[in-house]
Amino acid sequence: MDKIVVQETKPGVFTQVAFGQTFVIDDVQHGWQVVELWSDADLAEIGVYRVTPAVPPEGYEIVSASIKRLGGVVKQVLVTRPSPPRPLKASARQLRLAMNTLGIRDEIEEYVASQSRDVQDSWQWTTEFESNHPFVVGTAEHLNKNEAELIALFTLAQSIQ
C-alpha cells in the first residue's frame, strides 16, 4: 500500500506532499528522492512523515480525512458514516414472479395501466429493476407499500432462479 507523504508546516498542521514534488524546509529545497531514500527517523527530523492511509470499517464510507499526531504518531484520521444500502436488483421476470407469489401483481399492473405511455413502456421493456429507482419507489408509495415490503419483494425476486 502506498503511503501518504506529509510535511508538518506548523506544529500540528500537515500538508500533503504530492508524489514527485520538491518541498522546502528552513529555506532548504529537498527533492522527492529524500522521501524514497531516507529513513522514517531522518524524515521526521525535518518534519516529513510517511503515513499509512486509513481504511474505513466495512459498511462505512469516508466523509472526511485529515492528518493528526495521536500519541506522538502521525496518522490519517477518518470521519466516516454508514454507507447507504445498495439498491436491490431483480430481473423483470423475477420481479413479476415474486409479485404473483405475493398476490400483488394485478394491483401493480392496474396502476401501471393508469399511467402515461412512457411509464407503461418502462414497465413493459425494462429488463432489470432497482429497488431505489423513482418509478419503483413511486409505485410502492402509491400502493401504500412501505420500505420493508419493497425490500421483501426484491429479496423474494432475487431468490427466484
Image (cartoon, rainbow, N blue to C red):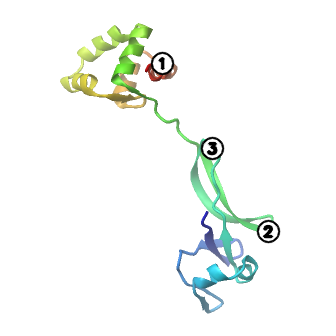
Q: Which residue is mark 3?
A: 58
Residue located farthest toward the left when viewing the structure as drawn: 117
Q: Earlier in the sequence, mark 3 or mark 2?
A: 3
Q: Residue furthest bottom?
A: 27
How many residues crowd mark 1 within 10 Å: few (<14), some (14–19), many (20+)? Answer: some
Seen at 38% across and 14% down, the residue is 97
Give the Cα distance between marks 1 and 2: 52 Å
- Amino acid bearing label 2: Gly
| Residue 59 on image: x %, y % | 60, 41
Residue indicated by mark 1: 156
Q: Amino acid at mark 1?
A: Leu
In depth, the one of 90 and 152 nearer the eye is 90
Of residues 19 and 140, the one drawn nearer to the viewer in this rendering: 19
SS for dot 1: helix
The span from disc 1 to disc 3 (Cα, nearest Å) is 26 Å
Q: Provide the secondary structure element on which disc 2 rests.
A: loop
Q: Mark 3 belongs to which amino acid?
A: Glu
Say what secondary structure mark 3 lies in: loop
1 vs 2, front mark: 1
Question: Of the residues under marks 1 and 3, which one precedes in the sequence?
Answer: 3
What is the quadrant of the C terminus in the image?
A: top left
Q: Position of residue 160 (x, y in %)?
A: 44, 19
> Residue 121, relative to residue 27: is it above or below?
above
Q: Closer to the camera, 97 or 58?
A: 97
**Residue topped by disc 2:** 72
